[in-house]
Amino acid sequence: MVAISVRPAFIVGVLTLSLVLAVLLLSSPTSPFYRTPLFLNSPMSKLDIWSVGRMVDWRPCKWWLQGHLTALPSKSNGFIRVDCYGGLNQMRRDLCDGVGIARLLNATLVLPKFEVAAYWNESSGFADVFDVDYFIQQLNGFIKVVKELPSEISSKEPVHVDCSKRKGQFDYIESVLPALLEHHYISITPAMSQRRDRYPQCAKASLCQACYSALRLTKSLEKKASELLEAIPKPFLSLHLRFEPDMVAYSQCEYPYLSPSSIEAIEAARGDRKPWTGELAQIWRKRGKCPLTPNETAFILQALSIPTNTNIYLAAGDGLMEIEGLTSVYTNVVTKSSLLSGEDFKSMHGNTKAALDYYVSINSDAYIATYFGNMDKMVAAMRAFKGLYKTLFLSRRAFAEFTSQGLSGKELMEALWKAHRDDFVMGKGSALPDCFCEFKL
């Protein structure tokens, strides 16, 4: 009697479970990483990614930190102002390049001009973000910097010299020096196609000094950043997550399984940049061109054995979409807006807010980025300069490749672990090569 009654019950249970699983599979989108929170155990209960021994470190080159400075020429060829555009870290990069160029051309550097841009919700200039006197002091001996121009040219606007990207490598001595000698006061925005490896050592050292030793936040902004750092529960991971509508639109990638509001925001930001479709879309994604969603990010963090109770500071701008894909898995997530209050924070613009994220990220216990943009490159390099090596860039290419192969669950987590372990072991992307040298451990 008992055996007869158990068998039907068992069969009914199995059939019911099978039916539920079938419904879930049929109702789910092709990719499980867009909307559904993922709670999975890390593969084989490994120690976290930071426990892996590194084979390579990047450290500041001795020729820069310990080298003998070449004496500045007694006479300058003129004055150069660096005009910086974009977000804070893009402007920082342009400024660093500009310092190297000014030394290359034997020019005196005028304090840079930061773009005032409605797009970036920005109105703050160089002196609103960085300590001007400290900047000048730290560059002493590397290059001459002035706050004010001589009276004979102070009323004039500089002659702008076009350094926009051209075929081949841009040559500043050939293309810019003649204009400097003729007009004595010029402005430039550094070209992306320059060859820094061809700079004389004095110019490279000036660039490095500007980037990693001369840029200190203003006292008021550093005080606010220090308060923010103090308020974050310790130890913590700083996560630079990029999934804003304009960025996704610019990537030309499709995410059909996002919420209706996210899809609407992306479409509004697309303009003429239509997404790739069909086979081209797959090729584009496999090249690592598509930003990771917060849910995909949470999955990769779990694959790296980052505990779900980790304190995470979210270094991100306004408009981040689908954030619940991360916070439903990693629940101890804080932001600058949740930790700071007051009218002074509300009045901050793009550059000053970005400066807070930068300050926290270079002082965090660990730093992970889902992209490899200007901020990520600067933060990684500064962390290497400070001797902080818990820095990692999540691989969009590896994620796209493995998921296109049909990997999922623990098999996918294992593949992601191995890919990121290899990157971390070799110090991949951890510093900019211009000022840092590879050091075998």
Image (cartoon, rainbow, N blue to C red):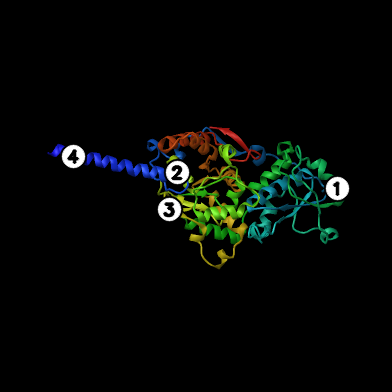
Q: Which residue is mark 2?
A: 32
Viewer-side label of 2, 4: 4
Task: For the N terminus, give its image quadrant.
Answer: top left
Q: Circles 1 and 2: CB distance less than 8 Å?
A: no
Q: Name the residue furthest left.
A: 1
Tag 3: residue type?
A: Asn
- How many numbered discs? 4
Q: Is 424 drawn above or below residue 355 in the view shown? A: above
Q: Secondary structure at mark 3?
A: loop
Q: Residues within 10 Å of mark 2 (few under 14, many from 20)?
A: some
Tell me which residue sits at (78%, 42%) in the image.
Answer: 172
Give me the C-alpha separation between circle 4 and circle 1: 96 Å
- In this rendering, position of residue 280 left or right of residue 10: right
Tag 4: residue type?
A: Val
Q: Residues within 10 Å of mark 3 (few under 14, many from 20)?
A: some
Q: Position of residue 167 (x, y in %)?
A: 76, 38
Q: Secondary structure at mark 2?
A: loop
Q: Circles 2 and 3: CB distance less than 8 Å?
A: no
Give me the C-alpha separation between circle 4 and circle 3: 46 Å
Viewer-side label of 1, 2: 2
Q: Earlier in the sequence, mark 1 or mark 3?
A: 1
Instruction: Give me the disc on residue 6.
Output: 4
- In this rendering, position of residue 223 left or right of residue 24: right
Q: Earlier in the sequence, mark 4 or mark 3?
A: 4
Residue 354 in which image quadrant: bottom right
